[in-house]
Image (cartoon, rainbow, N blue to C red):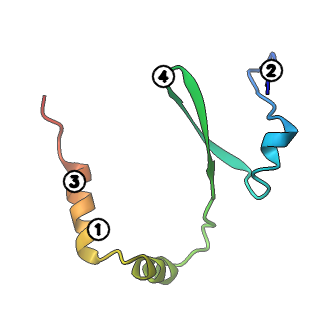
């Protein structure tokens, strides 16, 4: 399928592609190996409470230790 870039640098997705993502309004866009990759994104409403987040983490099996470990990893300075 083809998608044409408009003069305003916008792409219109073909109808057949859009049908595969009926509840998706947003896509994360990245480039890899000179290819455009669109990943559907579900936006979480700001009204989600901290308790709901904790409940979801518990359902997923994410522990406080996992969060601490992830933060430690993310805050590491890269050494070159």
Q: Which image quadrant: the N terminus?
A: top right
> Are the residues flagged by discs 3 and 2 in contact, CB closer than 8 Å?
no
Between residues 79 and 22, which one lies in front from this camera angle?
A: 22
Residue 30 locus on image (x, y percent): 54, 33
Q: Residue furthest left?
A: 79
- Tag 4's secondary structure? loop
Q: Residue furthest right?
A: 15
Q: Which image quadrant: the C terminus?
A: top left
Residue 25 locus on image (x, y percent): 74, 51
Q: Nearer the viewer, mark 3 or mark 2?
A: 2
Question: Any mark on residue 4, and which?
Answer: 2
Q: Is residue 66 above or below residue 42?
A: below
Residue 36 locus on image (x, y percent): 60, 28
Q: Which residue is mark 1?
A: 67
Which mark is first along the chain, 1 or 3?
1
Is 53 on the left or on the right of 17, as rendered?
Answer: left
Q: CA distance from mark 1 to mark 4?
A: 32 Å
Density class for disc 2 (Cα within 10 Å; few <14, some 14-19, many ≥20) is: few
Identity of the residue drawn at 68% across and 48% down? 26
Q: Which residue is mark 4?
A: 33
Identity of the residue drawn at 60% across and 64% down? 44
- Tag 1's secondary structure? helix
Q: Which residue is mark 3?
A: 73
Density class for disc 1 (Cα within 10 Å; few <14, some 14-19, many ≥20) is: few
Q: CA distance from mark 3 to mark 1?
A: 10 Å
Is 61 on the left or on the right of 31, as rendered?
Answer: left
Q: Nearer the viewer, mark 1 or mark 4?
A: 4
Q: Is residue 61 above or below residue 70?
A: below
């Amino acid at each position: 399928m083809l998608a044409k870039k408009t003069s305003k640098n916008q792409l219109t997705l073909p109808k057949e592609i859009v049908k595969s993502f009926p509840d998706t309004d947003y896509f994360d866009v990245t480039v890899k190996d000179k290819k455009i990759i669109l990943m559907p994104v579900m936006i979480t409403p700001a009204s989600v409470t901290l308790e709901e987040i904790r409940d979801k983490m518990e359902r997923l099996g994410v522990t406080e230790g996992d969060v601490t470990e992830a933060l430690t990893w993310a805050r590491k300075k890269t050494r070159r």
